[in-house]
Amino acid sequence: MAISLTTAAADHVSRSLTNRGKGLGIRLGVRASGCSGMAYVLEFVDTLGPDDQVFEDHGVKVIVDPKSLLYLDGTELDFGREGLNEGFRFNNPNAKHGCGCGESFNV
């Protein structure tokens, strides 16, 4: 099982952690939401939980809880800019369908 980051995503997370002044890495998870059923959750991590899985790519730690890992295994986290918009993109091989707005997915 693995989660990976592109260089662009790793650079963005590293800068964000530096600007924040603390943090072990980022947590990637899923929650029930949206029109397709599940939404991605990203947040800073200051302490690890006992069951957390830690993946490191390009020097950045991505922390995932076991329940979310079932839906996220193999996901590549990317970061990009299009015009005035910027944000993370989730290249998740487990996602079968996504909603039109791009906020949720199902497996």
Image (cartoon, rainbow, N blue to C red):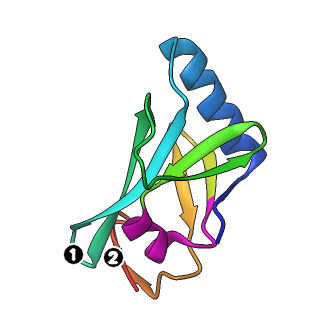
Which residue is tagged 2? 99
Q: Is residue 4 left or right of residue 32?
A: right
Q: Is residue 9 visible?
A: yes
- What is the tally of numbered marks visible in this picture? 2
Query: Dividing the image into 4 quarters, which one contains the N terminus?
Result: bottom right
Q: Is residue 86 visible?
A: no
Q: Residue at x 64, y 53 (%)?
A: 78
Name the element at disc 1. loop
The secondary structure making up most of the magenta span is helix
Name the element at disc 2. loop
Pick out the residue farthest to the front. Answer: 50
Q: Residue at x 52, y 82 (%)?
A: 94
Query: Dividing the image into 4 quarters, which one contains the C terminus?
Result: bottom left
Q: Which residues are magenta?
A: 66-76
Q: Residue at x 54, y 13 (%)?
A: 19
Q: Is residue 14 left or right of residue 107?
A: right
Disc 2 residue type?
A: Cys
Asked if the residue at tag 2 contacts the one at tag 1, i.e. Cβ–Cβ closer than 8 Å, the answer is yes
Relative vertical location of residue 62 with respect to residue 15 in this rendering, above or below:
below
